[in-house]
Amino acid sequence: MANPFRDMSVFIQGLVAVALAFIILLLGVYVPLSPVAQERDAFDKAVLQRSTLNTEVQQLQVYKQRYGELKQQMDALSKQLDTLKTIVPEEKETDEFIRLIQGAASSSNVTLRRLTAQAIVPREFHYEMPFEVQADGPYFNLMDFFGRLGRLSRIINVGDLEFDDPDKTRGTKYPTRPGTTVSAVFTATTFFTKPADVAPNSPASGAKAPAKPAGK
């Protein structure tokens, strides 16, 4: 039986072969479920997924930059909170308050005679913890003592200040050191914020007895 393909010229045979190869290639690309079609679909999906991820990454870059700014703000606020907790602690920290008063008195060469706790006063956002204090010494030493109280890490307000001759002070009499010219009785008030640390109408604990004289 005659083969028409063999009867064709070499040039025509080449064209036919190229045409058949092209048809087979098209069938492989466009026929569903063919390996080439599956690879092409997978490639298109990967490109689309990559484009979607790039868009998401660009959007998240804004949050990344914002996160750095927020972290810096949080660190700054945390430092401020630590500072505020020192200035106005959560707990009463009565013992630490007494040590601060005594340290300031000792540094100013002032003698503390008594430190008596008064009733705690509740406020809207904090509690006031007042103490009646009696101290004596040279006048300018007492002024230095009050200045030191104003520079302490914890807020201490001084009020109801009365000066008197050391020999005429009310209450218990104490022997005075040479150079003592004035006795001061005043209210020293500090603050704290924790409600659970408050007993109704009770004075601050730990300061009912007279303080030991400082500066000796």
Image (spheres, helix red, strand yellow):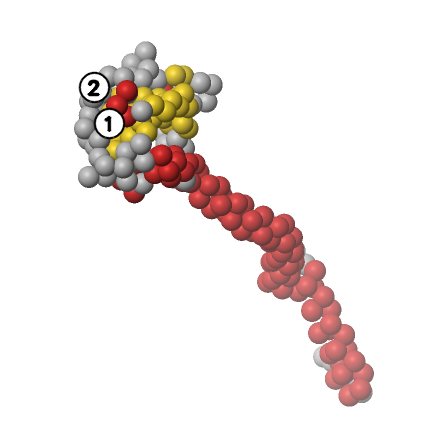
User: Badge 1, how many Cα within 10 Å: few under 14, some, many 20+?
Assistant: many
* Residue 59 rendering spot, x and y as whole percentages: 63, 50
Tags 2 and 1 touching, CB below 8 Å: yes
Residue at the far bottom: name it. 10
The spot of residue 24 in percent (x, y) is 69, 69
Residue 172 marker: 2
Q: Secondary structure at mark 1?
A: strand
Q: Which of the two discs, 2 and 1, sits closer to the camera?
A: 2
Any part of residue 197 in sight: no
Of callouts 2 and 1, which one flags the residue occurring earlier in the amino acid sequence? 1
Between residue 113 and residue 115, name the one nearer to us. 113
Amino acid identity at mark 1: Arg
**Which of the labelled discs sits on residue 86, or is there none?**
none
Q: What's the residue type where badge 2 is placed? A: Thr
The residue lying at 20 percent from left, 25 percent from top is: 174
Place residue 206 in its image quadrant.
Answer: top left
The image quadrant that residue 51 belongs to is: bottom right
Bin the neighbour count of mark 2 within 10 Å (Cα to Cα): few under 14, some 14-19, many 20 and up: few
Could you tell me residue 183's position as x and y percent? Answer: 31, 27
Q: Position of residue 200 (x, y in %)?
A: 32, 12
